[in-house]
Structures are given as C-alpha cells and as structure tokens.
Image (cartoon, rainbow, N blue to C red):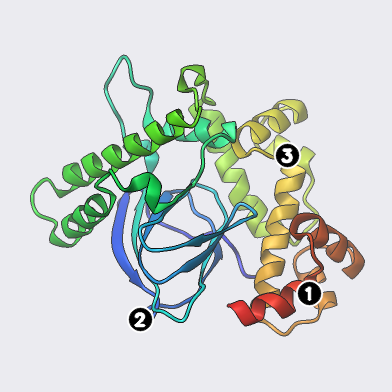
Amino acid sequence: MNYLYENHDILNAPYEAFLFDASREIFPVRAHWHYFVELIYIIEGIALVECDQKEYLACVGDMLFFYAGDVHAIYTASEMPLRYLVLKFDSNRLAINSNYTPKLSAILQYAKRSGQADTYFPASRLQHLPVRERFETCIQEIYGKEYGYDIRIHGEISSLLIEIIRIWQADGLQIRELAPLCAETESSLRNITEFIDRHSHEPVKVEELADMCHMSYSHFAKCFKELYGRSCKDYIELIRIEKGEELLLFTDSSLSVISQEIGFADCSHFIRTFRKWKDTTPGKYRSSHRHDH
C-alpha cells in the first residue's frame, strides 16, 4: 500500500529550506501530506499544483502555502524547466512571547478552519514584499549552519508568516475571533489522521476513531471538522480518492483492482465516490491527466 504520509524528523530538524530543480530530482512530486507547514516560491517554469481538491497554475513569482495535513502534489505545466524554492517548518516552534500577538501556530490553525485564507499568492500580491529574499536567506543559513542560523531562520519564517497573515486580514480574516483547539485535542486528531492514512484500505469506523482519541462520538466529530474543515467520514473518502488518483496516474491497474486496494467495497462505489470529489469518472481522469503529467 502506498501511504500518503511523508515522515519528517520535526523534533531534531524543525526547519528545511532548499531549491527544488525538477530536472534533477524525482519528479513529479506525488500526492503526500506531512505534519509541517510548507511554502513554495516559483522561480522558473509553470507548476500545476493540486491541494485540498483545488488546482492552481503557479508561475514565476507566485507562492503557495500548504497547511500541516494538506494533501498536495506538484507537476509541471509547460515544457520549460520547473524550479522553485521550498520552506518547510514546524509552526509550533514559532513561539512569540507576547501578551498581544497569538501564537502563529494557533493563527494558522484558525485560518485553515475559517475558509477565508487563500493559500495561493500570485506575484501581484507579493510584489511589495521581499519574499524571494526570505526564502534565499533561509536556504543560505541552512547550508551554512553558522552561529545563530536557527534564530535567523526563525526570524525570516516568522516575518514571512506575518506578511501572509496581514494579506489574509486585508481579505477579511478576523483573528480577534481566534479560538484554537487545545493542544491535547489537536495532537490526538493529528495522530488519528496518520492512522487513517495507514488503514484507509480497511473498514474504518468513525466511532472507533473517537474511542481511540478517548472522546465521545459527537465531540470527536465536532473537533475533527473544526480542525480539518470537513467531516471525518469525508476525510476518509478523500484519502481513498487521493490514493486512487495516484494509482490511476502511475499504474496500469484496472478500476476493479484499484477500488479494492484503496478500500472500496466494489468498483461502482469507487466510481460514484470519485465522481463526487472530482466531477469526472476515474477512466476519464486517467486518460486526460496522464497526458498532462
């Protein structure tokens, strides 16, 4: 079974920064998710980015923001080489000792739940900001590892996030209404999503997941939707469909085999659910997207 979860040693390596060159790396970047936040900034070519059931065409100067837990994939959308800068970090490490400013991690959680915070930033929204410079400074610090490099990276990422949050505020996000989940509840829910990823091909019952988190069904369902913006049942369906996409694009397996491998009772159920999420059939998706990718 191909898991979507990408492991990362957040405890010992809370930051990553690098240049990704599609001509030199394993590409495309297939659908995956992780516990850290990721930002990419396009410096050459055009990227087709899939994230949270949306598609974006990202050109030079555009930036994309992937929340912790977002399933995302990156392909090329032109004949030109694709190169982009990458920042990955654990938002919980971005602590600010302030009586006024909420924790950045709490703001990001709230922004995701609100549905008011765009994760695609076209170059026109960033032209007055030193975005590329912040990425490049983090990359230089990571590779140089001179005294205080982690403090410098912390500052650059925090400044970039503040600029992002201010764009969200200009678009209507009200962080005064901030009411994040408690840390213990959020930790339980993040652990359960990894369990779902590893067992999505099996019968997974929401009631059993609630028991694993030591919550009542109603409290679990409420907290899950608050954190992920969709019900747990829909989340399980989405993970199965994302894995189905991978198999459609990168294998020649039949629809019947794919449906069984990702946890659907039969092929017709897979087709109905795929159409619900993708507004097309698996067969049409495979024939159209294979040419694109």
The correct choice, above or below, for 64 with respect to 2 in the image is: above
Q: Residue 59: x, y in percent?
A: 43, 63
Residue 231 circle label: 3
| Residue at position x 22%, y 57% in the image | 136
Q: Nearer the viewer, mark 2 or mark 3?
A: 2
Please report contact status of discs 3 and 1: CB closer than 8 Å, yes or no: no
| Residue at position x 51%, y 33% in the image | 111
What amino acid type is highlighted by mark number 1? Lys
222 or 78: which is nearer to us?
A: 78
Label 1 belongs to which residue? 284
140 or 162: which is nearer to us?
A: 162
Q: Secondary structure at mark 2?
A: loop
14 or 158: which is nearer to us?
A: 158
Q: Quadrant of the N terminus?
A: bottom right
Q: Earlier in the sequence, mark 2 or mark 1?
A: 2
The quadrant in which residue 19 appears is: bottom left
The correct choice, above or below, for 121 with respect to 108 in the image is: below
| Residue at position x 44%, y 78% in the image | 26
Q: Residues within 10 Å of mark 1 (few under 14, many from 20)?
A: few
Q: CA distance from mark 2 to mark 1?
A: 31 Å
What amino acid type is highlighted by mark number 2? Arg
Q: Earlier in the sequence, mark 3 or mark 1?
A: 3
Label 2 belongs to which residue? 24
